[in-house]
């Protein structure tokens, strides 16, 4: 591994990041197509659908949001959807925490933009680059920007042409996100002992998934992994 | 109905819902950086955070893969194997999805 550089930002990094984001495209396209299709079926307007994708920009919470979407809102239903969104997206607090040392000398507006565009896939690609010694924040932002664009375009396509998309199961595309995540696990492997927290995370997520509905298993497993990581010397 | 209630019942309610969802999601996104810039990162905290990427991955995919049965497990194994051998993420992804498509075509 080359000696760690100081954190910096470059426009060449933006391009590098956009290229590095490529393996996340299939997952983003499939998920956003599915979201756009579901939103149209549910009767959302194009503006509402694109608004969710552009501003909330967090797939799981957008899907859950559709389930409790209202034609006519009341203060209670708005409070409900906001609370559910916060619960589903609480795991992002953890992702963001790991980025702090890398971003601490960045100008605030750029960090705000970088974090506004934070996703698990982009974070994993950025983390891999960081683990390999890279410190160019442009890579993180370039990756995030292109993924956001892909997400918006695929949402738009799903909204109008969702019914035209061939059955995704036939090409294994319903599992494209898990397969991408599994691939990203490989460069993280540093031997058996550093992987013990992962085992704890997996077991806890399975248990929580079996006992509780929704997406809580992700944050429960992730927290278990962090705690075990803190306990192992 | 009061003024707020009748305002929310118009199409502006959707705007408000999206704005609220955007705000809490953005708060989650910045909270980690905001908190970590105020606490001293001890070696213990650093170890915990270093365990996070792999932990998030396993916590996310394990329940999904097991719910989808052995074809998903074989596909994941193929993807990981291809990635270990080539270290090229796109090839790992293609190997996993290709394996799954082949299993389903004959299944």
Image (spheres, coloured by chain):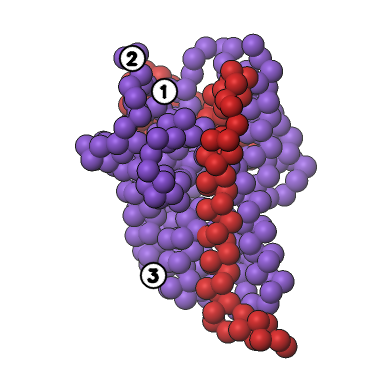
Shade of chain B as shown in the rendered figure: red
Measure how far apart labels 2 and 1 are at the Cα level. Answer: 11 Å
Secondary structure type for disc 2? loop
The chain displayed purple equals A
Q: Are marks 2 and 3 in contact (CB under 8 Å)?
A: no
Q: Is residue B37 visible?
A: yes
| Chain of residue at mark 3 | A
Residue A202: percent from the left, percent from the top? Answer: 64, 29
The mark closer to the camera, 2 or 1, is 2
Q: Earlier in the sequence, mark 1 or mark 3?
A: 1
Residue A99: percent from the left, percent from the top? Answer: 47, 34
Residue marked by disc 2: A3
Packing grade of label 2 (10 A; few <14, some 14-19, many >=20) is few
Q: Residue at x 59, y 12 (%)?
A: A193
| Chain of residue at mark 1 | A
Q: Are marks 2 and 1 in contact (CB under 8 Å)?
A: no
Q: Quadrant of the N terminus of chain A?
A: top left
Secondary structure type for disc 3? helix
Residue A192: percent from the left, percent from the top? Answer: 57, 12
Q: Nearer the viewer, residue B55 or A114?
A: A114
Where residue A131 is drawn, which disc sits there?
1
Q: Residue at x 38, y 65 (%)?
A: A156
Packing grade of label 1 (10 A; few <14, some 14-19, many >=20) is some
Where residue A160 is drawn, which disc sits there?
3
Up-down: is B56 above or below B87?
A: below
Q: Quadrant of the C terminus of chain A?
A: top right
Measure how far apart labels 2 and 3 are at the Cα level. Answer: 49 Å
């Amino acid at each position: 591994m080359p000696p760690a550089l100081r954190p910096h930002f470059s426009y060449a990094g933006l391009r590098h990041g956009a290229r590095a984001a490529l393996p996340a495209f299939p997952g983003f396209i499939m998920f956003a197509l599915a979201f756009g299709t579901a939103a149209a079926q549910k009767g959302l307007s194009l503006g509402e659908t694109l608004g969710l994708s552009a501003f909330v920009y967090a797939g799981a919470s957008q899907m859950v949001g559709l389930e409790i979407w209202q034609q006519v809102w009341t203060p209670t239903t708005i409070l409900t959807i906001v609370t559910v969104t916060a619960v589903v997206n609480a795991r992002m607090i953890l992702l963001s925490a790991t980025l702090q040392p890398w971003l601490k000398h960045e100008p605030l507006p750029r960090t705000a933009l970088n974090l506004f565009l934070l996703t698990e896939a982009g974070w994993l690609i950025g983390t891999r680059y960081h683990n390999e010694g890279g410190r160019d924040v442009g890579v993180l932002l370039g990756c995030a920007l292109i993924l956001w664009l892909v997400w918006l375009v695929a949402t738009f396509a799903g909204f109008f042409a969702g019914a035209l998309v061939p059955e995704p199961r036939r090409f294994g595309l319903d599992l494209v996100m898990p397969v991408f995540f599994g691939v990203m696990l490989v460069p993280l492997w540093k031997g058996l002992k550093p992987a013990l927290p992962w085992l704890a995370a997996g077991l806890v997520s399975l248990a929580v998934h079996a006992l509780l509905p929704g997406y809580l298993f992700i944050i429960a497993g992730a927290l278990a992994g962090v705690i075990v990581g803190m306990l192992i010397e | 109905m009061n003024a707020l209630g009748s305002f929310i019942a118009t199409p502006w309610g959707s705007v408000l819902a999206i704005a609220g969802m955007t705000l809490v999601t953005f708060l989650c996104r910045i909270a980690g950086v905001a908190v970590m810039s105020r606490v001293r990162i001890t070696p213990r905290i650093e170890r915990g955070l270093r365990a996070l990427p792999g932990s998030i991955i396993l916590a996310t995919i394990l329940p999904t893969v097991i719910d989808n049965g052995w074809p998903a497990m074989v596909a994941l194994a193929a993807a990981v194997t291809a990635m270990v051998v080539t270290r090229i993420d796109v090839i790992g992804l293609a190997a996993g999805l290709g394996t799954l498509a082949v299993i389903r075509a004959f299944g």
